[in-house]
Amino acid sequence: MNPTALMIMLLSLAIGTTMTLMSHHWLLAWIGLEINTLAIIPLMTKTPHPRAIEAATKYFLTQASASALILFSATMNAWKTGEWSITLLSDPYTITLSMALMMKLGLAPLHFWLPEVIQGIPLSTGLILSTWQKIAPMALLLQISHLTDLKLLITMGLTSILIGGWGGINQTQLRKVMAFSSIGHLGWMVLILKFNPQLTLFNFLLYITMTAAMFFSLMSISSTKISEISSSWPKSPILVTTMMLVLLSLAGLPPLTGFSPKLLIILELAKQNTLLLASVTMLASLLALFFYLRLTYVMILTLPPHIPPSSTNWRTTKNSPLTATMTTLALLIFPLSPTFLLII
């Protein structure tokens, strides 16, 4: 892609998200979401492949449907209340706006577009879609969290955790694995949204850090399949080792970064006397733990002296400082969790 066009698209993404974050008005928030949607489509189709075109089309149709629902609901709410303020919503329209924002995020059962779209686009665009594109809808969802129906949030959260774990079990494509991982993590965030929005924000920031670290690592070794990871040890042993640790962090194993949000969410659910919900959530997360451990197991089996014969180029991979920084954060934030929570 032309560097000037790429810069314009990335600048548009930044402007769209910033506009949504700064707005108190539903119409301005909707415009920011639309700028975001339109700016990422050329990045999806920068490789002119039928799969990329299909992914961009699916993404556009889904996001356009959700945006239309947001605009119609906000207009009807303004007609009823006389206000366009984001935090002033009347009862029937809170649910439709929440569902539309969850559709934009890719929460189950409105998740069907996400794995297919991420599978059809490059890793760099998949990184943007999995992290940056979720900031604006999540910010709006946090602002209306006190108005959202608790039963809806619990249902969507549990469904997302189950589908995020169940869908990733038999995948061989790493981008689909990351898509289902995203669905599962978003389920944890939505589950606690009504009880403790600050904890949802904390979880979201750590999710972005860990997902970005994983995508940067995959981009460094140019791997999109599990079979390609299994032959990456000769290229960069240190990177493959840190990737295994990032996967375990995404799974939520102590003492890595990913353990802190899960621990704090379970403690908050217990504090709210929802012990049954906490138990079901922990059991559902075992599905996701299985496919993270499966990926880690594939990497461990190919460590020396068990390297399979392959046509891999024996060369070292240059790791960028950004990859190193994100990986370090994705592994070592756990002791600093109380400090970050106090800041939030």
Image (tube, helix red, strand yellow):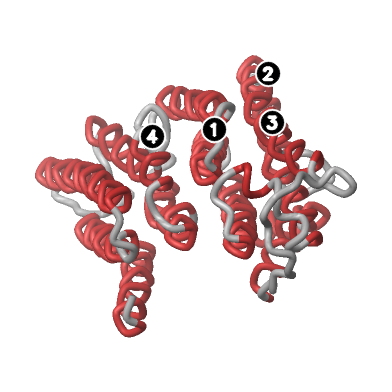
| Vertical placement of residue 40 versus 111, above or below | below
Of 201 and 8, the residue lying toward us: 8
Question: Which residue position is annotated with label 4?
Answer: 111
Mark before the other along the chain sequence, 4 or 3? 4
Assess whether mark 3 and mark 1 are in contact (beta carbons under 8 angstroms). no
Label 4 – label 1 distance at C-alpha: 16 Å
Residue at screen point 57% across, 62% down: 219
Residue at screen point 19% across, 58% down: 27
Label 2 – label 4 distance at C-alpha: 24 Å
Question: Which residue position is annotated with label 1?
Answer: 171
**Mark 4 or 1: the one toward you:** 1
- Residue 289 is labelled as 3
Please state which amino acid type lies under the numbered disc 4.
His
Q: Position of residue 329 (x, y in %)?
A: 72, 61
- Residue 279 is labelled as 2
Which residue reaches farthest right? Answer: 305
SS at circle 2: helix
SS at circle 1: loop
Label 2 – label 1 distance at C-alpha: 26 Å
Please state which amino acid type lies under the numbered disc 3.
Leu
Please state which amino acid type lies under the numbered disc 1.
Gln
Q: Position of residue 104 (x, y in %)?
A: 34, 45
SS at circle 3: helix
Please state which amino acid type lies under the numbered disc 2.
Ser
